[in-house]
Amino acid sequence: MTTRESLPQDVLEALSRGNKVEAIKCLRTRTGMGLKEAKELVDRHSTHATAPAPDISTRPVIPASVIAALSEGNKIEAIRLYREFAGTGLKEAKDAIDRLEVEHGTSRTELASGEVPRSRATWWLTLAISVACALAIYLLAT
């Protein structure tokens, strides 16, 4: 079970001022927790509940710059920043960022503004036109 003392000092200070929103933001920044998980932990501590909570001391602290890059949709930058921070290889950093994406709900499945969906039909159409042009050139040459 997580005790009050295991929370980062800035989170405890925000809670002592009665500012839950700031406490949640600080906790997410310091631990890399998802919003729901951080809110539940802050709520438990602010109401003095005794329900078991995740042990944040075993979670790696993710720099805010990595989380910011990820939330802006810049996954490559997030991976680069994570590699610099953690000193890991490319695969380990990509796996960590993929996990963060899922935890923070920042996976981008929708298209960006102005982005056109990719379609295999376009590829097949281009191939068919190329074959038709090659066939026309061959027939005209003979």
Image (spheres, rainbow, N blue to C red):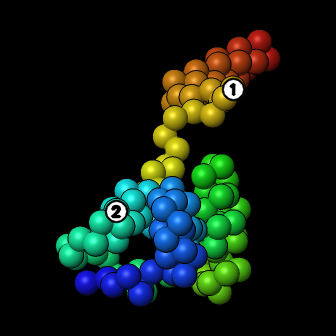
Residue 127 percent across, percent down from the top left:
60, 27
Q: Are marks 2 and 1 in contact (CB under 8 Å)?
A: no
Residue at the location (48% across, 62% down)?
A: 18
The correct choice, above or below, for 7 with respect to 34 in the image is below
The correct choice, above or below, for 131 with respect to 34 in the image is above
How many numbered marks does the figure carry? Answer: 2
Q: Amino acid at mark 1?
A: Gly
Of the 4 image quadrants, the one containing the N terminus is bottom left
Q: Please give the label number shown on residue 114.
A: 1
Q: Amino acid at mark 2?
A: Asp
Residue 141 percent across, percent down from the top left:
79, 17
Q: Quadrant of residue 112?
A: top right
Q: Quadrant of residue 111?
A: top right
Q: Secondary structure at mark 2?
A: helix
Q: Nearer the viewer, residue 112 or 18?
A: 18
Residue at the location (64% across, 67% down)?
A: 64
The first of marks 2 and 1 along the sequence is 2
Judge from the rendering whether residue 24 lies leftward or rightward of residue 2; answer left or right: right
Q: In the rendered image, is residue 31 in sight?
A: no
Judge from the rendering whether residue 58 lies leftward or rightward of residue 62; answer left or right: left
Q: CA distance from mark 2 to mark 1?
A: 41 Å
Residue at the location (66% across, 49% down)?
A: 72
Judge from the rendering whether residue 79 lies leftward or rightward of residue 38; answer left or right: right
Q: Quadrant of residue 69?
A: bottom right
The correct choice, above or below, for 1 with respect to 77 in the image is below
Q: In the rendered image, is residue 63 in sight?
A: yes
Q: Which residue is mark 2?
A: 43
Label 2 Cα crowd, 10 Å radius (few <14 / some 14-19 / many 20+): some
Is label 2 or label 1 in front? 2
Q: Residue furthest left?
A: 51
